[in-house]
Amino acid sequence: MGRKDDQGCHRCTGRGASKKGSRPAKVLYLDQYRWRKAGQALRQKLGEFAADPLFSREAARAQEIYLAGINPYLVNENEEMIMERCFEWFIFDYVMKGGETLIDIYSAITGQPELEERLVREWCSSRMSIFEVCGVYPHKGIRLKDLILGSKFTVINYNVSGELEKGAIVYMRVIRVGEEYEFSTGGLALPPAYGKALIKKVNADIRRYTSRKGRGSFSPELYLRDRAYKINAWMLDVALNYHSSPDREGVAAESNISSLIAQRITDLFLDDYYEKWINQPVQALGDKTPKEMCKTVHGRTKVEQLLKELETVEKTRLKKGQPHYDINKVRARLGLIPGGPVNRAARERIHTVARISEGEENIHWADRAQAGVAMLVREEMKLKNYTPEQISSAIRLWFDYCGKENPTIRKEKIWLAAVIYTLARLEFNNSVQQQKLAAEYGVSPSSLSEKYRSLCRSLDLVVFDRRYTSGSSPIEGLELSDPLLARIFYRLKL
């Protein structure tokens, strides 16, 4: 993972760890090459499986849980890395309502290539864990010790910016691929002094977890699965709040950013966050959006109760001298107090016209950037030889989504890729693959998945959706929320 950040936290990426066996090197290499190819194919299939609309509600709930404990401006500064790790956690560790993880459901699909089938069975039990760096061998590998499970192994071909020293603490998932070990995704590494604070926090949490579960029923693997999102948040928090000096272990670090700048960062991030939040389903509101709830007296009361809870959290931060947020800004956006941004936006709305097909049909867009994405979709799909009907359907899909969510457009290409990918999935067009499409447009696969899931969730999309496709669905009338039916469907699909 990229650079060493300002909090002293290394970012690591990489894969591979080798065990020397008795076979000739060439035979081992050819065999391992097959394993690596199988691992790459499996990663891609897992990503596409997790991004399917079947799991959109679970994915939204998982994202909400994962991000809840992370400082907002850390998310803003490291969005792609954090969302990638969130997506990976959703696949491996998040337990769905049926009691299974997503990778458990995928592993039950029959008819997979033999090597992929063997890999996925082993990966099902793989957990994020805390590792101590026992040795660093430049251009060769990194020796790790699992501080929770006790195992040791070497990962080669890793990539870490900055100097990763012996004794550093790494929080990663290590998966086995044939005779090698790989990091499953980007991870975090803390200098030794930072790491001690994290370990102290985790040990205290293990004691609490054990007391709740009962010492006789404690399972380290289950603990790592249940608490993965918490440990990840603690790791980021330790990097932000602690000195690297062993003499100051456990003492909050003096911020390198002035309190005024920190407050400004918080305001900018949360302004954007709540602009999206008011248009997203909230579990506490019965999966309705705050904006929808504010249309009725009863709904406004429910929203106000929720805002008061958020306000209590912000007041606590204010008392501690931490950056905080004025929840009245949210009330103004929702029209709960007069003179808010919502009223100004209504007065200042810009209408832009974009032709959506070869015919004369026009659409009025509420935002120039959203219209810009529509124009990109039209031009790109024409270049790729999509039919006029498909182009019209894609832009109609984008228009309907904008009408419901009014998304803020930062990167046009991420939304361009998401619309094209969504149409492909609706039509069962397996030639459009998530990884390749992300690489083509220079965006991360996890960001593409997140936007795709948002489109599916907001519009409640189903395969061969009659609103946006002309084909008929082979599963029309089936309820696929049950994991068993999902497996049957995906066996046919894959």
Image (cartoon, rainbow, N blue to C red):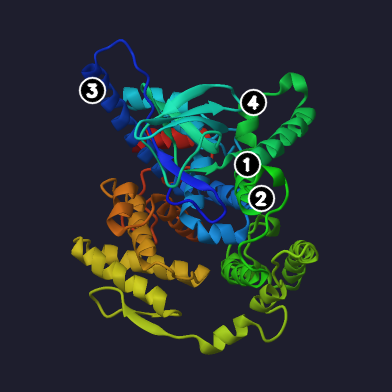
Q: Earlier in the sequence, mark 2 or mark 1?
A: 1
* Vertical side of 26 occupied by 473: above or below: below
- Residue position marked by numbered label 2 in the rendering: 242
Distance from disc 3 to disc 2, alpha carbons, whole Å, reads 46 Å
Q: Mark 2 or mark 3, which is nearer the start of the sequence?
A: 3
Q: Is residue 108 visible to the viewer in this orientation of the structure? A: no
Q: Residue at x 56, y 43 (%)?
A: 190
Residue at screen point 76% across, 61% down: 313
Q: Is residue 277 visible?
A: yes
Gap in angstroms between the C-alphas marked 1 and 3? 42 Å
Q: Position of residue 23 (x, y in %)?
A: 27, 12
Q: Amino acid at mark 3?
A: Leu
Q: Are marks 2 and 1 in contact (CB under 8 Å)?
A: yes
Mark 4 or mark 1, earlier in chain: 1
Q: Which residue is mark 1?
A: 193
- Say if mark 4 contacts mark 1, CB within 8 Å: no
Instruction: Read off the residue under disc 3.
Output: 30
Which residue in the structure is indicated by mark 4?
A: 220
